[in-house]
Each structure stands twice: as structure tokens, then as C-alpha cells.
Amino acid sequence: MKQDAQNASQNAFGASTKAASQSSLRRYERCEIQAPIACIRDEGLAFETVVEISEGGLLMLVSHDYKIGEIIDLRFFIPGHSSIEIRGEIAYLMDSVTMGPSPARHAGVRFLEAPETLAPSIRSYILKIKSGRSV
């Protein structure tokens, strides 16, 4: 019984350490955002919602089926900046538990062929949000 409690404690500690280390290993700082996004793909046009953004990519709440490795053209804007058009690759898919009748599905997108102006625009937006300034 004591061993089980120790294992549970170690597992919980290990899990939180793992989550913390993943966060510190991220290449780019992330920021929450709620913005519509148009995804142009072989199957046609899909409208989704961006929920996180970084200089290297974004996380979308999706209602369409995507495949890991799928290349899509994205069109969206971040408040206070001009419209962004960029090609992206679906890096991962995940389902999460929600309060609604079905799980929410998310797609992580890695930016490809980013224009030079993209990183400064996103960095500026993230700094404004993190500092509490209005956008």
C-alpha cells in the first residue's frame, strides 16, 4: 500500500515535471487568441477558429477532418495587424474533453515558407497580450 502511494506520487510528480519541461522546450512563446481562419485545402474551403498562436505555428479548433502532414493554405488576421496568408502543415491532431455533447478536436499547424514580416507581427501581438496592453 505504501509502495502504491509512492508510485502514485512519483507518477504525478513525473507528469507535472514532463509538462513543465515540454513547455520550457517549446521553441516559440505561445498566446491564446480567438480568431476565425480560412483553410484552403484539396477538399475545398473550411472555416475554423485559431485558439493559440506562436511565431512557428498555431492551434485550431476544427470541425473538419484533417490528416497529419496535410498541407493547407491559411488566411487569418491577428488584431492590430494586417491579414496573414501562409502555407501550413498539419503537425498533430488531438481530441479534448469538453462540457458539450462531443469532444473538441484540435489541429496543430506548423507554418511553412513564412514571410519575413510574420514573426515580428506575431511577436508584437504576443508581447501586447502578455503585458496586458490592448491590441
Image (cartoon, rainbow, N blue to C red):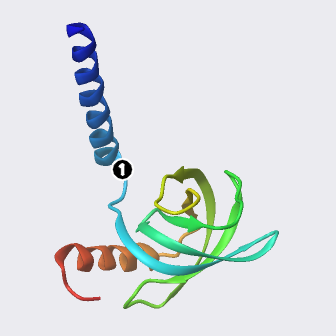
Q: How many marks?
A: 1
Specify the amino acid type for callout 1: Arg
Q: Residue at x 46, y 60 (%)?
A: 99
- The location of residue 86, given as percent across then percent down, is 59, 75
In the rendered image, the quadrant that contains the N terminus is top left
In the rendered image, the quadrant that contains the C terminus is bottom left
Q: Residue at x 27, y 42 (%)?
A: 20
Foreground pick, 29 / 64: 64
Left or right, residue 82 beside residue 3: right
On screen, residue 83 above or below 132? below
- The location of residue 66, given as percent across then percent down, is 70, 59
Foreground pick, 96 / 45: 96
The local secondary structure at tag 1 comes to loop
On screen, residue 63 above or below 70? below
Q: Residue at x 62, y 57 (%)?
A: 90
Foreground pick, 112 / 74: 74
Q: Residues within 10 Å of mark 1 (few under 14, many from 20)?
A: few
- The location of residue 102, given as percent across then percent down, is 59, 58
- The location of residue 62, given as percent across then percent down, is 60, 66
